[in-house]
Image (cartoon, rainbow, N blue to C red):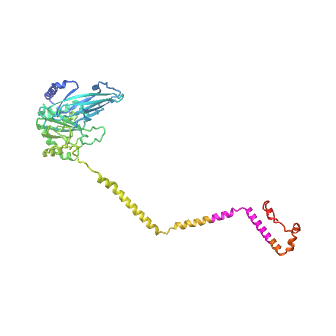
């Protein structure tokens, strides 16, 4: 880079800063001026809330920014917390014709749970001449939080202003940057490698001869770009040394020159390059989502009948058929279990009868024998009385001498009643 080009770049940067600060709204407290279609960054640190940063606990504060009156930030604005800088960063690109807006930032002390709120008024300054040309770059060895350090973007812009795009020295600016992973790229295989960033540089000036020559040099890589991403150091160009000197590793497979860009397009939304060209050529009107009242209501009666009633009806029919089959089939079956239980009952009765006979006491059998002998004796005596009546008359007198012998004595109670 020549010394004269560097001086011109410094003068342009100072003049741009003074032009922005000349607006009286920018000097108001809690106000910040931004330029449409140009990236801005804002650091959110404890000093913004009049808190002291702690070296022992650098990540003790949490921040939550949102658009005033909304739960979140606009679609073109992002917020991330950087553990490298121990601060939050709000960044984005205001679209063309963007009105002034206000952000509310709520900070929470995670140690004491104290909260604080700050309101920042953003004044959007319109660009005098809209940028119609863009240069798309992908840089391997950078992350989004690296771009919050101003010298990275300044070094990148200085390469184009001094060597590649000298015609855009007055209005060249960064119109968009984002993480390559956020835009669909893969995470690096090595944990120590950074995820990469995609940067758009815009200007109203026409492309220089150096950029057109670089486009022709990278044109054979378009086929590879559509299939998959290029590996690192896959292709080096003639101007690669300019970027390597300032520690930029550019993916030349993603290098592209975009002509006649529409300034009204939201610069934050990333659209695939092949699709964006197709849509722009069709000139289709913008699609607006319908309101809630216009959305037709859907009835779930048919789904209810199919999912609940039909299976229940099929289950009931199957249960009835199964019951009928079991009932009619049971009548023709010879149940062998009944014979089995009858034999078990017979065996049980025999066992119970034998046990009852075995449990009869011996005393009862002796008493039964004594009764039988007494009965036979009485029968013999009655027969003798009927045969000899004379002897029967003398019986009372000779009873003590000629009487029959009494039966054997078995019990004190029953023997006295049997013997006469």
Task: Provide the residue span drawn in magenta.
Answer: 350-379
In the rendered image, residue 164, in percent from the top left (x then y), is placed at 14, 35
In this rendering, would 392 be left or right of 45?
A: right
Comparing 148 with 122, the one in front is 122
The reply to whether the magenta stretch includes residue 357 is yes
Residue at horizontal 52%, vertical 66%?
337
Q: Is residue 120 above or below residue 265?
A: above
Question: Is residue 365 or residue 116 the one in the foreground?
Answer: 365
Q: Residue 187 falls in which quadrant of the image?
A: top left
Would residue 379 appear left or right of 102 to someone viewing this image?
A: right
Location of residue 136 (image quadrant): top left
- Please identify the residue farthest to the bottom as the structure is shown: 387
The x, y position of residue 101, in whole percent, is 20, 31
Q: Position of residue 30 (x, y in %)?
A: 23, 26
Say which of 1 and 195 sits in front.
195
The answer to whether residue 293 of the structure is visible from this angle is yes
Magenta stretch, main secondary structure class = helix
Residue 85 visible in rendering: no
| Residue 55 shown left or right of residue 152 in the figure | right
Residue drawn at 73 percent across, 63 percent down: 364
Q: Total marks drawn?
A: 0
């Amino acid at each position: 880079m020549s010394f004269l080009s560097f001086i011109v770049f410094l003068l342009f940067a100072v003049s741009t800063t003074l032009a922005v600060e000349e607006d009286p709204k920018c000097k108001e407290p809690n106000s910040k001026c931004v330029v449409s279609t140009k990236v801005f960054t804002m650091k959110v640190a404890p000093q913004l809330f009049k808190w002291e940063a702690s070296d022992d606990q650098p990540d003790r504060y949490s921040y939550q920014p949102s658009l005033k009156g909304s739960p979140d930030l606009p679609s073109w604005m992002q917020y991330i917390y950087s553990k490298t800088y121990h601060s939050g960063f709000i960044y984005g690109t205001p679209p063309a014709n963007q009105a002034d807006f206000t952000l509310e930032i709520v900070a929470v002390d995670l140690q004491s749970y104290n909260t604080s709120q700050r309101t920042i008024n953003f004044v959007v300054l319109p660009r005098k001449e809209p940028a119609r040309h863009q240069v798309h770059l992908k840089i391997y060895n950078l992350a989004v939080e690296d771009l919050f350090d101003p010298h990275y973007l300044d070094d990148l812009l200085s390469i184009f202003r001094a060597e590649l795009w000298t015609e855009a020295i007055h209005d060249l600016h960064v119109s968009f940057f984002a993480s390559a992973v956020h835009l669909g790229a893969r995470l690096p295989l090595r944990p120590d490698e950074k995820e990469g960033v995609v940067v758009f540089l815009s200007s109203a000036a026409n492309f220089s001869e150096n950029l057109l020559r670089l486009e022709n040099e990278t044109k054979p890589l378009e086929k590879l770009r559509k299939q998959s991403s290029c590996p690192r150091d896959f292709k080096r160009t003639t101007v690669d040394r300019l970027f390597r000197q300032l520690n930029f590793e550019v993916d030349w497979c993603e290098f592209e020159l975009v002509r006649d860009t529409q300034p009204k397009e939201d610069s934050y939304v990333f659209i695939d390059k092949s699709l964006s060209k197709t849509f722009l050529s069709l000139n289709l009107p913008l699609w607006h989502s319908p309101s809630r009242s216009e959305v037709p209501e859907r009835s779930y009666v048919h789904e209810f009948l199919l999912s609940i009633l039909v299976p229940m009806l099929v289950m009931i029919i199957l249960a009835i058929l199964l019951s009928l089959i079991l009932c009619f089939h049971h009548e023709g079956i010879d149940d062998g279990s009944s014979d089995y239980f009858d034999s078990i009952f017979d065996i049980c009765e025999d066992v119970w009868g034998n046990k009852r006979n075995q449990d009869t006491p011996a005393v009862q059998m002796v008493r039964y024998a004594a009764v039988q002998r007494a009965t036979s004796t009485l029968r013999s005596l009655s027969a003798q009385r009927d045969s000899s009546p004379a002897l029967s008359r003398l019986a009372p007198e000779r009873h003590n001498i000629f009487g029959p012998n009494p039966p054997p004595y078995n019990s004190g109670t029953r023997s006295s009643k049997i013997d006469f």
